[in-house]
Image (tube, rainbow, N blue to C red):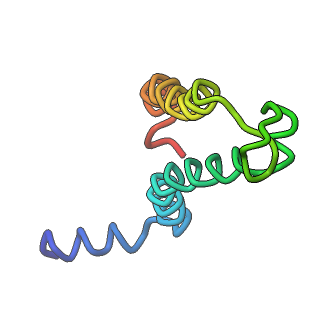
Amino acid sequence: MTSKEEEKERMDSRPPTVDMKCALVSVANMQYGLDSACLAALQAMPGFLKVFGYPDPSAPGGYGIGHTFQQLVSSFLTLGSLLSTLFAGPFSHLYGRRI
């Protein structure tokens, strides 16, 4: 049996769950843009503005929200990404290639 045939047999013998896990991890990278878009839409919702905003007669919905607060809320997405990367290395070292 040649090395190419052995490699093909080895690849065919792995469980399909490995492929599904790899696909799920690769799709997770697309979620960052979705989070940002959902957060922007959330900050424009009237209910959010009534709770976290202030009355502003010149705004279309009657409520406004400060730029500092918008930037702070958006920055928490990046902070969450940073914290998750700090834990990803030790997590993959502990559980990598065992699942």
Answer with left or right where residue 42 lies relative to residue 70.
right
Answer with left or right where residue 77 lies relative to residue 8.
right
Q: Residue at x 47, y 57 (%)?
A: 30
Q: Residue at x 56, y 63 (%)?
A: 17
Answer with left or right where residue 14 lies relative to residue 72.
left
x then y, percent, for residue 92? 46, 33
Q: Residue at x 58, y 24 (%)?
A: 68
x then y, percent, for residue 14? 44, 65
Q: Residue furthest front?
A: 58
- Asked whether 44 or 61 is in front, the reply is 61
Quadrant of the image for the N terminus? bottom left
Is residue 92 shown above or below 28? above
Is residue 14 shown above or below 34? below
The quarter of the displayed image where residue 80 is located: top right
- Asked whether 45 or 27 is in front, the reply is 45
x then y, percent, for residue 32? 50, 49
x then y, percent, for residue 4? 16, 73
